[in-house]
Image (cartoon, helix red, strand yellow):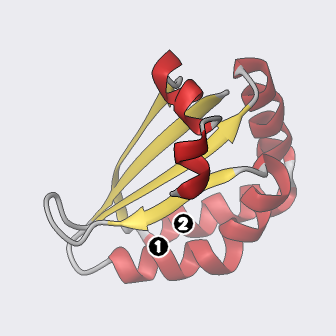
Amino acid sequence: MIVDLRIYTTLPNRLADFVALYEEQAWPLQLKHLGNCVGWYTTVEGELNTVVHMWGYADQGDRERRRMAMAADPAWVAYLKVAAQQGALVKMQNRILRPTGFFEAFKSSPEARQA
């Protein structure tokens, strides 16, 4: 499994606007196309005005197929247009992560099932 870590920074006082638009228009589309949301968060300390979300994929090929299908969806294209017009975003980052061997072993351990 790999995880696509995405970090978006908004203008000050625009985080709520960005999250509201995302929840209404993008969230249903991303669930439909990407499927495995590992987490979706906003910061409360540290670098503020930041959204962090993570999407799990079987491998890079799975990620590319799913993201290409989403990019071809007219509803996604429409969302991107509205989000650009909103003008709340100032920075977007993404990183592809893979778990370490000891974490994979932990996930299948009795300790992980108790947590």
Which residue is pictured at 39% across the width and 48% down the height?
7
Badge 1 crowding class, 10 Å Cα cut-off, few under 14, some 14 to 19, many 20 or more, is few
Which residue is pictured at 65% across the width and 54% down the height?
37
Three-letter code for the amino acid on which mark 1 is drawn: Gln
Which residue is pictured at 68% across the width and 68% down the height?
27
Badge 2 crowding class, 10 Å Cα cut-off, few under 14, some 14 to 19, many 20 or more, is some
Q: Quadrant of the N terminus?
A: top right
Q: Position of residue 91 (x, y in %)?
A: 33, 48
- The residue that mark 2 highlights is 83
Residue 8 vs residue 109, the one in the foreground = 109
The answer to whether 7 is drawn above or below residue 67 in the figure is: below
Q: Quadrant of residue 9?
A: bottom left
Q: Position of residue 115 (x, y in %)?
A: 51, 57
The answer to whether 22 is drawn above or below residue 52 in the figure is: below
Q: In the figure, is residue 2 to the left or right of 46?
A: right
Three-letter code for the amino acid on which mark 2 is drawn: Ala
- The residue that mark 1 highlights is 86
Q: Disc 1, disc 2: CB below 8 Å?
A: yes
Residue 69 vs residue 99, the one in the foreground = 99
Can you tell which mark lies on residue 30? none
Q: In the figure, is residue 16 to the left or right of 103?
A: left
Residue extending furthest front? 110
